[in-house]
Image: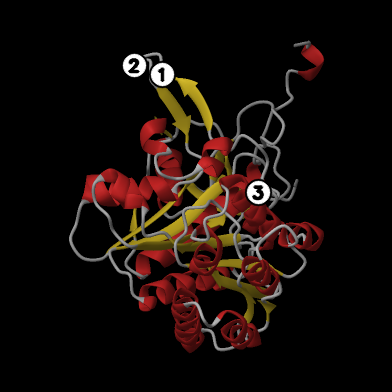
Amino acid sequence: MSTENRWLLPEGIDELLPERAVQLESLRRRLLDQCTTWGYRYVIPPLVEFTDSLLIGLGADLDVVTCKFIDQMSGRMLGVRADITPQTARMDAHSIAEDGVTRLCYASSTLQSTPQPVGSGRAPIQLGAELYGSDCVEADAEVITLMLSMFETAGVKRSLTLDIGHSAIYDALFLDAGLDADLEAQIFGALQRKSVPDIERLASTLPADISRKLLSLSALHGSTSVIVGARKALGSEPVVVAALDELEAALELVRLSYPDVDVYIDLTELRGFRYHTGLVFAVYLEGRGSAIAKGGRYDNIGAVFGRDRPATGFAIDLKALVDDAERQKTDDLPIIAPQSGDPALREAIAKLRLAGRVVVIDVPPGVALAEADRLVERRGQWVIERDSAL
C-alpha cells in the first residue's frame, strides 16, 4: 500500500470523529438507562465466538454475513458477531440459566461481511433488548412498546411508522407445503423484495392452491384493514387465524401506551435473519427507506444450547439513529487551565472535574477551542473567567 492511501479504511468500515462519537455515546447511555428502568439488565457478549456456537441453528443468511477466521490457539473457526441476539440467547440458556422471565439489554459493535441498507456500513453499533421465558402476547407487546419508547427517549422529531407482521403466516403457507428448497427460497426472496414480477412468475409455476396463497399474501400489506382482508383470503388456515389474533392483540396492547402510532401491517414482513417464529416488527422513520430498528419473536434459538426458551426482542442501529436523535447540549464551556505546580490549582482542577466540568491543561503550542473559559489566579484564588481571546 502506498503512503498516499494508507489512511483509507476498508469499504463499509467507518470511524466516528469526536462530535459524532460524543453524541452517539450520549444516545447509547440514555437508551440503556431507559432499558434499565424497564427491568432489563445490561450484558456485554464477547466480540468473537466459535462459529459452531455463534451460528448453530440460525440458517444460512446469518452465516453468509459473518466474518470468520481460524483461532490460532485452538485451530477452530471463530466468527465475529454479525448479530448480538443469538449471543444473548446463549447467555440466557447457558450462562444465566434462570427460571421465569429474564430481561437482558446490550449495546455493542457488530461486523458484517457486506454493507447493510440502513447506512451504517459493515460495522453497525447494535443496541437491543431481549425478553426470555414468556410466550404470551403481553411479552411481545412489552418489547414493541419499549422499542417505540427508545425513539421518544432519543428525542427523534421525524414521524415514525411501526411495521408489523407475523412470520408464522409465511411458514404455514409455504414451509409446510412440500416445496423444493430452492423454489421456497425464491418465493421467500421475492416476497422479501416485494418484487411483483418475480412473485407473478413464481406463482405461474406453482399448483393452483399455492399460487393463490402466494398472490393473496403478496397483496396483504397496508393499513390495519389488511387483517380483515387476510382473514377472508387465508382464514381457512388455523395457524394463520391464530397469528392474526396474536397480531391484533399485540397492537391493542401497544396502543395503550402509543394510541396514535402509525401502523403498517405487512404480512410479507420477512426482513432480517430467518430465525423469527412469530410476530416480527420494525420501525421506519419518515424519509428513511430502511428500517432503523427491527425485532420479533424467536422461540427456537435456545434449544441448540440445551434450554428451549420462548424469546422476543428488538435491536436498533445506533449509527443510523444518531443523526436523528436530539443533540445533548450543555451550557458549560470547557475550561483551560495553565501549566503550574501550584497545589491550589491542582485542587481546583480536581474539584471541577469531580463536578463534571471539562478542564484542559494548556500545553504548548496551545489549546485550540472555539469557545472556552479559563482558570486564572486572582488574589491568591483560582477562578473561572471567560477567555476573551477566543
Q: Is residue 78 visible?
A: yes
Residue type at tag 1: Asp
Dot 1 alpha-carbon crowd within 10 angstroms: few under 14, some 14 to 19, many 20 or more: few
What amino acid is at disc 3?
A: Arg
| 206 relative to 72 in the view: left or right | right
Dot 2 or dot 3: first in sequence order is: 3
Q: Is residue 372 left or right of residue 375?
A: right
* Residue nearer the viewer, 300 or 372: 300
- What separation in Å lies between label 1 and label 3 (alpha carbons)? 34 Å
**Which residue appears at 66% of the width and 50% of the height?**
186
Q: Which residue is mark 3?
A: 20
x 72%, y 62%: residue: 203
Residue at left offset 77%, top offset 63%: 200
Q: Could you tell me residue 153's position as x and y percent?
A: 53, 70
Q: Is residue 282 above or below residue 89?
A: below
Mark 2 or 3: the one toward you: 2
> Which of pointers 1 and 3 lies earlier in the amino acid sequence?
3
In front: 152, or 273?
273
**Is 301 placed above or below 219 here?**
above
Mark 1 secondary-structure assignment: loop
- The residue that mark 2 highlights is 74
Label 2 SS: loop
Please give the name of the residue rendered at 77% of the width and 66% of the height, measured from the top-left corner. 287
Q: Is residue 97 left or right of residue 311?
A: left
Q: Identify residue for label 1.
A: 71
Q: Is residue 289 visible?
A: no
Residues at marks 2 and 1 touching, judged by CB atoms closer than 8 Å: yes
Q: Position of residue 191 (x, y in %)?
A: 68, 60
Question: Looking at the rendered structure, which numbered label has been put on residue 275?
Answer: none
Instruction: Bin the neighbour count of mark 3 within 10 Å (Cα to Cα): few under 14, some 14-19, many 20 and up.
Output: some
In the shown orientation, is residue 53 left or right of residue 207? Answer: left
